[in-house]
Image: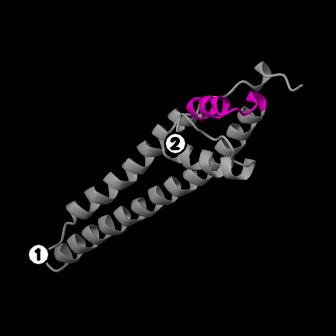
Amino acid sequence: MADWYGGYRGMSTEEAAIQIAHDLTNLHSKQTVFKTLCKSGWDPYEAATLVEAVSSQVNKEIWKEHRNSMISYGAIALVFVSMSIASYLLAVNAGGGRYLITWGAIAVALFCCIKALFEWLHYKKVSGEIIDLSSFKKE
């Protein structure tokens, strides 16, 4: 997070946007980032507008990342479930014998899939607040 004493002071809009994206990605709330911008001398309306704009883009990128993780780990779990079922059916059709059950791999893949979902939900909760732009009049 940009430090509290200097904050975003002296940064261009582009530099501030990059720092805001970094801070939001690290689960700092939009309100905290907004207050830091204001303490650094930014106009409250411009600060609120910039935080909301950056937050929207960050939300899209983080959703893509977590969605891809959930899909990938879900697919891995399905592959291992299919291997277990195929192995069992081959053993049964052969009249008995050994077969492979991949419980560990299935459990790890499902754990990672669920973890990605909960990380997304946590991020959504932290970043979900909205800064009311109507309270700042552009003069």
Residue 81 appears left or right of 1: left
| Rendered image: mark on residue 11 | none
Residue closest to the eye, 74 or 34:
34
Main structural element of the magenta stretch: helix, strand or loop? helix
Residue 109 appears left or right of 91: right
Residue at (43, 45) in percent of width and height:
119
The segment highlighted magenta reads 31-45
Badge 1 is on which residue? 98
Amino acid type indicated by mark 1: Arg
Magenta stretch: includes residue 50: no
Dot 2 alpha-carbon crowd within 10 angstroms: few under 14, some 14 to 19, many 20 or more: some
Badge 2 is on which residue? 1
Instruction: Indicate the quadrant where residue 24 lies.
Output: top right
Residue 117, how many percent across, how many down?
44, 46
Residue at (69, 47) in percent of width and height:
11
Query: What kind of element bears circle 1?
Result: loop
Q: Which comes before the other along the chain, label 1 or label 2?
A: 2
Residue closest to the eye, 28 or 83:
28
Dot 1 alpha-carbon crowd within 10 angstroms: few under 14, some 14 to 19, many 20 or more: few
Q: Which quadrant holds the C terminus?
A: top right
The colour mode here is one colour
Residue closest to the eye, 123 or 102:
123
Residue 16, how many percent across, how many down?
67, 47
Residue 81, how many percent across, how many down?
30, 64
Q: Nearer the viewer, mark 1 or mark 2?
A: 2
